[in-house]
Image: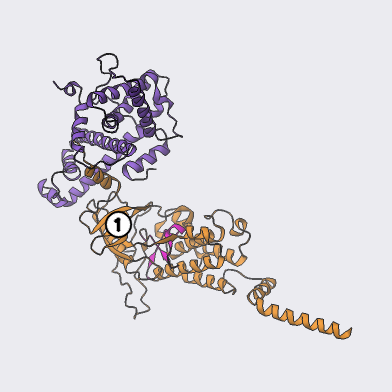
Chain colours: A purple, B orange
Amino acid sequence: MDPDTDIGGAHQRFPVTNQSAIAAARSEDQVVRQRAFDTILNSYWKPTYKYIRLKWHANNEDAKDLTQGFFADAFEKNHFAHYNARKASFQTFLRTCLDGFVANERKAGKRLKRGGDVNHFQFDFLSAEDEIAMQAMQANDLNAEDYFHREWVRWMFTMSVDTLRQRYEASGRQVHFQLFEAYDLNDDDTSVSYASLAETFALEPATVNNYLAATRRDFRRIVLDKLREITATDEEFRTEARSLLGVDVK
Amino acid sequence: MKWLSDSKLTHLRAVVGNPDFSGTKYSFVKELARGGMGTVYLAEDTELNRQVAIKVLSTPEMTEDLRRRMIREAQIIARLEHPGIVPVHDVGVLPDGRVYYAMKFVRGERLDEYAAHTSSTRERLRKFQAVCDAVAFAHAHGVIHRDLKPQNIMIGSFGEVLVLDWGVAKILREAKTEDASEADTLILPAVGDNQTIDTAHGTVIGTRQYMSPEQSRGEIDQLDERSDIHSLGAVFYFLLTDQAPSDGRPRAVNPKVGKPAEAICLKAMAHARSQRYDSAAELSADIGRLLDAEPVSAYRENAYEKVSRWVGKNRFLVLLVLAYLLMRIFFIFTSRS
């Protein structure tokens, strides 16, 4: 049995909050700190895993161990509480910590399995591997920093799309999401137009416009909410928003 | 979770952050500037193979009526053909329903950037006079700008002055038709009862430091040419002091500012509309007089100032007469001795 398959799946155990998890990581309260760590973990585990796989050329088993080990180490030693927003973005800080961790592990010649065979965190490594396989078909001449950033953007957008889908399903706006999926997420059919969607969904073209505009606004809001959770300061939030969406946020 | 390819990531960023130009002849290049009423993008006109600036108006709750009115405003502005007004090439609606219009992409620098390296008062006055002339032209065609500020004025590569961003302009009335021979005179159909089109009723539109008191109070019905004249006065204040208007008089900020220049500025920026210049053309004329060292309408000179100005204007003649007199005195003394 492929060991990938026995590792968790998509999970929604992370609480939604608009407060900065980076700031909360310094909290004296163990519960608050744990919640902040979960948020950071959820936002960064996949880019971290892919980064280790592709930029540190680790095989999937080592990459899994290193990802688990990195976050377990960060949690045990409360590394994220030491982040200083004046020195760098959180993303840069995390990647620098990760590089240091992997380099040290390699130097020590360890092959980690923290706490024996126990996985500390439930990660869907299988989906990450699928994505790496699909990405192999795309051009990839990015440097390490840009690669990590791009994968983080991809993960942020993926999570936001999932949140959007859940919210729209819960509120009975499936058509909105289906339009968004067909026009903005669909890679297969490039002939989709507003007019063809209007015909397919038996809607007025103006309604397609309005639904898509509203859905994109909600999507943008969700992305920004997620971003606010994992940035430490307003300045960092604005900088990351510009980098993520190309927009100025007040 | 569905995997998002690189092309979908790019697309999502474009449709969420940037306008979706699909279905138009433009392709997105980059964002140029962002303001309260919209965002300006650099785009490629794929048919004519040239770069254009596209303003996409930020009106999330766009109704059909509002869309129609905004398009017509853009069409009216597009017909303001003047060397000092940036030409509008095209107007349309994006797939998401937002109105855009494509303008000439002006290469150059903004007035505030220009002022940062141009200390010559005369040069600044000439540029400002060109701005007044462009605004006067628009006023003559029944259009007020409503957001005049240094950031909306460009100095082109050849020194030409262009007033940008007519996106919040207001159409006051039909164009004046006294010059019947003018081929491009605007003849607008009547619009409602009050003959005006408001972009946003009761909303404060513009940039507070440069807007008139009535505009900052959101009294859109009260806006007319004199509101733009107040903004022109504020731009003039900036050119005199290198600062955005504040409570201080220009001379308090920059003691080198002459009294006539300060008087022009304060008259244009008068709190009461009735005390301002009646037209941008009048303001332009006063700037012209200032450049020619002539008395300006905004300032009553005393005898000493009149003489000083006359001496300043005729410096060469005065020096010649003084030299002649000194020579005469010298000869009188030498002949006596």
Up/down of A193 relative to B153, above or below? above
Q: Residue furthest top?
A: A116
Q: Nearer the viewer, residue B186 or B203?
A: B186
Q: Is residue B145 magenta?
A: yes
Residue A139 location (% of width, % of height): 23, 43
Taking the image as shown, residue B227 lies to the left or right of residue A143, namely right
Residue B74 location (% of width, % of height): 31, 62
Label 1 sits on what residue type?
A: Ala
Instruction: Give the residue displayed 39% in from the left and 21% down from the top.
Output: A78
Up/down of B253 relative to A137, above or below? below
Q: Which residues are magenta?
A: B141-166
Instruction: Give the residue displayed 18% in from the left and 34% down from the top.
Output: A133
Q: For mark 1, does the 10 Å Cα neighbourhood hold few (<14), some (14 to 19), or many (20 or more) residues?
A: many
Quickly name the residue at label 1: B43
Instruction: Give the residue displayed 19% in from the left and 51% down from the top.
Output: A206
Q: Is residue B253 shown to the viewer in this render?
A: yes
Q: Nearer the viewer, residue B125 or B246?
A: B125
Residue A10: name its quadrant.
top left
Q: Is residue A224 magenta?
A: no
Residue B260: name its quadrant.
bottom right
Quarter of the rendering occupied by the N terminus of chain B: top left
Residue A173 location (% of width, % of height): 18, 38
Q: Secondary structure at mark 1?
A: strand
Taking the image as shown, residue B163 lies to the left or right of residue A174, namely right
